[in-house]
Amino acid sequence: MSWKPVVLCPIDFSDASRGALRYAGAIVEHFGSGLTIATIDDPLLADAEDMATSAGHMAAETRREGERFVRETFAHRPMPAVQTRFESARGKPAAEILAMAGRTGADVIVMSSDGATNVRRLFFGSTTERVLRETTVPVLVTPSADHGPSILADVRKRVRHIVAPVDLSPATEGHVQVAAALARALDVTLLLVHVVEPVRSARPGFRLIPNVDSERRDRAERELDTQVRALATPIKAEGLVVFGEPSEEIVKVAHDRDAGLIVIGLHATALVGPRMGSVTYRVLCLAHVLVLALPPTTIGSDAPRVTTGD
């Protein structure tokens, strides 16, 4: 029996969220699963409108606007014939999205990065950032400028190749399983990437042992080759070891290899649970492709099996 993920897609009626909704529609169309479309109303605005009109007026209006937004988003083709439900809430967007994911049993959240560029720094939306810092389910982050696939077959054309960064520890084994399942389902190449970071020390007079970088790289290449050969067939996969700053190198590899999807894990600690690490944050800021962020609590030996069948 194939996996049928429940998808939660928050929308804010922007073009960016329209693109995310099209990706969410493609996912549920492929799996024949359920889609929850979420809208979050600002509580102050909602209270003001209720006082000016009637209680519940804004919620009803938001629901109507949401239905219209969905019809327009899929105007080029029928809405996927799957169970679709609308959910609305009042409050802080990130907190309400996470709470809604729990209530609806969502297996994945699909939302736009809502990115913007500043002269000094790249940002992605604060709501998306907060969701990623607290989520316990995978989050597919879509680029704000990506209008989404017109038809299901477009997803493979847009993904083309999948990049999965690995640190060669047991923590990334689940990431590889998920990335491999997606590569198999989409029939695209999977590229496992390990970044060898420069050795630094604040100690005065520190000298790096000669040839240590080449030794580290050779060891990483052997371990990565073992991981590639261990992947179940049929799958097109290769390993690549690069040297430098992890986030920059990951994005550079994705760009150079024309990859449309990066599968990356979220940092975790025993005390605070899933939290977005600095590498993931930088990748999301720098990359202009799909990024699937995987919290450690949902991946591992029980990673979902993605199939191309019904």
Image: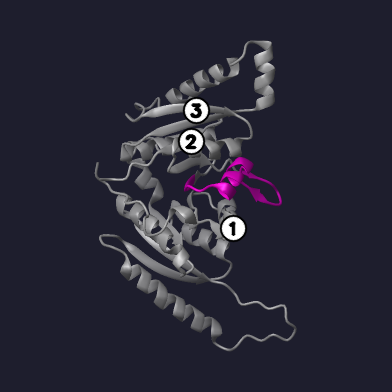
**Amino acid type of the residue that numbered disc 3 sits on in the rendered structure:** Glu
Mark 3 nearby-residue class (10 Å; few <14, some 14–19, many ≥20): some
Mark 1 nearby-residue class (10 Å; few <14, some 14–19, many ≥20): some
Would you say residue 25 sits in the magenta stretch?
Answer: no
**Amino acid type of the residue that numbered disc 2 sits on in the rendered structure:** Arg
Give the mark nearest the N terminus, 3 or 2: 3
**Residue underneath mark 1:** 277
Q: Is residue 271 above or below residue 205?
A: above
**Residue underneath mark 3:** 87
**Residue underneath mark 2:** 103
Would you say residue 136 sits in the magenta stretch?
Answer: yes
Give the mark nearest the N terminus, 3 or 1: 3
Per the model, the C-alpha gap separating discs 2 and 1 is 26 Å
Identified at 47% across, 64% down, the residue is 171
Identified at 43% across, 35% down, the residue is 22
Identified at 36% across, 41% down, the residue is 154
Identified at 51% across, 82% down, the residue is 214
Residue 52 position in % (x across, y down): 68, 11
Closer-to-camera residue (292/255):
292
| Circles 3 and 2: CB atoms closer than 8 Å | yes
Tell me the colour scheme of the image.
one colour
Question: Start and end of the magenta stretch?
Answer: 116-140
Per the model, the C-alpha gap separating discs 3 and 2 is 10 Å
In the drawing, what numbered circle is on residue 210?
A: none
Residue 263 position in % (x across, y down): 45, 55
